[in-house]
Image (cartoon, grey):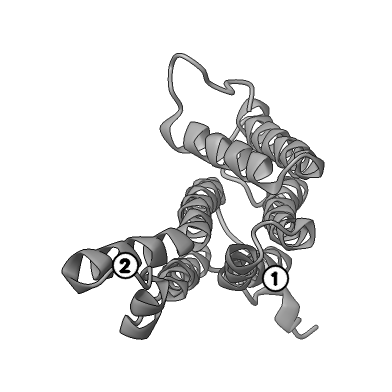
Amino acid sequence: MPALYTRFSGGSVGRLAGLSDGVFAIAMTLLVLELHVPVMEAVHHQRPVWEGGTLGAEQGLWHALVLLAPKLLAYVMSFLTLGIFWVGQQTQLNQFERADRHLTWIHLAFLAAVSLMPFSTALLGEYIEYRLALAVYWLDLLLMGGMLLASITYGHRAGLLKADVDDDTRLAHRRRIIGYQALYAVAVALSVINTYVSILLIVLLQLNSAVAPRVWRLSSF
């Protein structure tokens, strides 16, 4: 009986990791493109009419940079987000002995969500006070987390994990994903108060994940 293509396609974990590195690198680079240097006309437009000379132009530039603050905040948050998800995906891929077609497509779906991050970041930076923009950003986070959860779940059921990956290690992946996704949902729910409150909480969660301080750590995640 001839072998089916689906039985041996998409079997390289190394190629999947290489593709992921490339997608993450491009997405992280595209984030900064939304931070446009203020043009001279905008600087002079922001300068008070009663001021002139260098001092007035300096103040105009300061004001123009302040207007960039929402986009800069969204950039920092998203760079942290992509960094954390890159570490999470690479940690997962290191647990796999091999891949198969289904696992590969799960990670391609994950990378599709990663490639959407520049768009959701630009939307949030432009409409940072709009709950809908924050909700779109959160859906991107949810999709990335959901795909990583699907990956570790499928990998266990399909017998793709390395022999030394025990249940505690596998469950640690699940707890971390589910725990942080639940906290992201709580953060977005706080947008009924103010979107900046939500964003601040998300940034704090990202910093906790990146730094993992000994004083306060979500150790169960």
Residue 172 placement, left or right of 186: left
> x, y percentage for residue 204?
54, 35
Q: Residue furthest top?
A: 215
Residue 38 visible, this angle: no
Picture disc at residue 105: 1
Residue 110 visible, this angle: yes
Mark 1 lies on a secondary structure that is helix
> x, y percentage for residue 184?
71, 41
Type of residue at label 2?
Answer: Leu
Q: Residue furthest left?
A: 54
- Which comes before the other along the chain, label 1 or label 2? 2
> In this picture, is 96 found above or below 75?
above
Q: Quadrant of the N terminus?
A: bottom right
Q: How many marks?
A: 2
Mark 2 lies on a secondary structure that is helix
Give the residue drawn at x 35%, y 75%: 43
